[in-house]
Image (cartoon, rainbow, N blue to C red):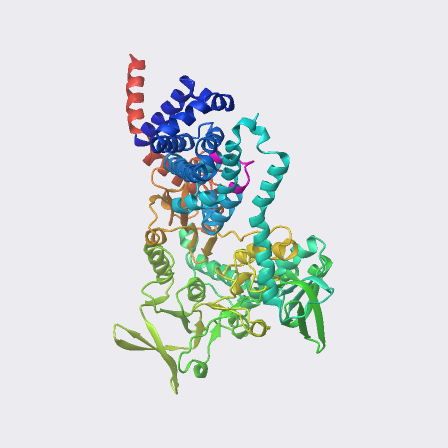
Amino acid sequence: MKKLALIAALAALVVAFFAFDLDQTLTLAALKAHQARFAALHAEFPLSTAAAFFALYVIVTALSLPGAAIMTLAGGALFGFTTGLVLISFASSLGATLAFLASRYLFRDAVLARFGPRMKALDEGIKREGAFYLFALRLVPVFPFFLINLLMGLTALPARRFYWVSQLGMLAGTAVYVNAGTQLAQIDSLGGILSPGLIASFALLGIFPFVAKKLLAFFKARRVYAKWQKPAKFDRNLIVIGGGAAGLVSAYIAAAVKAKVTLIEARKLGGDCLNYGCVPSKALIKSARVAHTLRHADHYGLEAGEPTFSFRTVMARVHRVIADIAPHDSVARYTALGVEVLQGYATVVDPWTVEIQLNDGGTQRLTTRSIVVAAGARPFVPPLPGLEEVGYVTSDTLWHAFAALDAPPARLVVLGGGPIGCELAQSFARLGSAVTQIEMADRLLAREDNEVSQYARDSLARDGVQVLTGHKALRCEQDDTGKFIIVEHAGQEQRIGFDELICAVGRVARLTGYGLEKLGIPVERTVVTNEYLETLYPNIFAAGDVAGPYQFTHTAAHQAWYASVNALFGTFKKFKADYRVIPAATFIDPEIARVGLNEQEAKAQGIAYEVTRYGIDDLDRAIADSAAHGFVKVLTEPGKDRILGATIVGEHAGDLLAEFVLAMKHGLGLNKILGTIHTYPTLAESNKYVAGEWKRAHAPQAVLRWLARYHTWRRG
């Protein structure tokens, strides 16, 4: 109501301005006709006239009324150049700031509700460089200042910054008009004030900040490169170090745009995902799930029984799956696409030179315009006393270490309660291992909401996993009776025996061994990059796990696009990596998938939200599949259908999540999902039904009561 009242008041003032023909007083002819009377009034009441002029100028600019240019001329004519410039400079900046604040108060919330994700990205850019762009716009009188005021009010630019940048940026244009006002008798039209030459000068002045920015970047780069000798010509446009998801996509994009690109990988192409992570783990999960289904076949009206199998055969299938997918990432395929693939270890010698120790024993040096570092990550092994002595495997090494086993490990300890640890713990339990999972935190999957973590724990426990949360691993021991891990819980030590131990406590970026240290490229937990994925050297980029902040194959490929395009075309245009909508899934049974915020993150960030839930136990297809468990939970803005995040727990949750990823990426709300036809009977209907739950909770009750009366009246 306050906003409506303010809009009405402002509208009334604007209407009155035109209704009483006040716009006719702010013309060049009227100003020249009344110049002598204004001068006499000013001579008699100098301070009052100056104060009244100042106030009127503020009102005109605050209401975005036409006539500011005429008033600027009047200021020069009445008060002279110096006094007129001071009065008008401050009055115009104050009026512009009032217009800016009014726009923000009246319209920003509505714009955020309609274009939330896009505005968030814009706001982040404005916070970094808003003053720079505003200053450039203020210098060019071609852009209507009133429009700049209103549009900037819709952004997150601080009002104080808007004021002082406007004060400085408008000064040059104001000075031109005030000076013209001192020569009012010689002016025949406003067009004469700004000649084409003067406009061109202002335009050049306006682009000066951009030129200055480029020059600053040039000199900064020159300082960084000062101690290196740049080659006169280059062997390659791009060299990519690492043949995982980020490296493969980077090389593919370069080849697709006909750049000369070399991809260097010492081990197998496909990286961790194909050879040690996503692919083998999902193959194992499938075999374990089939075993679980056979064990519980009575759920489907069949006779249940204990599955019989050779674990060696299960592992052989895992390696067969890897082999079947490997051609997608093979040397032959990428060579056919136009990528030169070299098998060996790369070292960055200088910002443009890479030396390759080839696997066949040779050495090769190549110069390149740009480099993409996509070295990936490796499992983190904690410095646990005795761990090396008792032996362990990681999520990378277990596939070969266990390949020759006829049976799964009888007693298996899984160290770690994250996604990898949970997936492996459940799979081996379903295949017959007695699994103990140890997690130092008080719950599994600590990044998920408490109810999701509990759901995962209950699911693993049902499959026989002994889950020990809040247990800190202290050391490992070995004696004649076997291997043991000692853990501490509530001040008490506990000794747990095992035959095999899987270390799954996380992964760390590969930061050494390929020359970053020599070049002085900063590293923390990952290689330090800017929003364009540039390192300290503007021609060296990082992508994938080595760059962070996410360790997903799909984000590695996503970053690779930005890194390669910026590396090849950054001279003309650079693109900032977009992390607004990042999906993730944990492939236990039932699956857990999420995009955007969950409740604990929203609370931690102080973001207001509403929760809408739909229980999959009520879904027809889930009931038919004996998969009636789990839920869909969506966070939205209070009172609005804009999606802040979605979490799905249930069968094929990772697949079902795609609809919410699409909706969030393109600004579609729950109403759009509800209005979309979903095939019956499918699990995807759960997405429609959770949208229906939101709609029902926000039904206009007053309207529905009137409709009930209407229908009663219609019945007679």
Write down the quadrant of residue 61 in the picture.
top left
Q: Position of residue 195 (x, y in %)?
A: 61, 34
Q: Is residue 73 visible?
A: yes
Q: Residue at x 57, y 25 (%)?
A: 188
Spot the residue most to the top. Answer: 716
Placement of the C terminus among the 4 image quadrants = top left
Measured from the top left, where is residue 339 in percent x and y?
A: 70, 60
Q: Is residue 715 left or right of residue 434?
A: left
Q: Is residue 330 left or right of residue 123?
A: right
Could you tell me residue 207's position as x and y percent? 58, 46
| Residue 676 visible in image | no
Q: Is residue 3 above or below residue 510?
A: above
Q: Which residues are magenta?
A: 138-146
Q: Is residue 374 above or below residue 595?
A: below
In the rendered structure, does residue 145 fall within the stretch colored magenta? Answer: yes
Based on the picture, tell me whether residue 157 belongs to the magenta stretch: no
Q: Between 280 and 92, which is closer to the camera in this rendering?
A: 92
Quick one: 661 or 326, which is closer to the camera?
661
Residue drawn at x 32%, y 71% is 471
Where is residue 111, by image quadrant? top left
For the N terminus, the quadrant is top left
- Most foreground residue, 144 or 8: 144
Image x and y of residue 337, in percent: 71, 57
> Quick check: 552 left or right of 112?
right
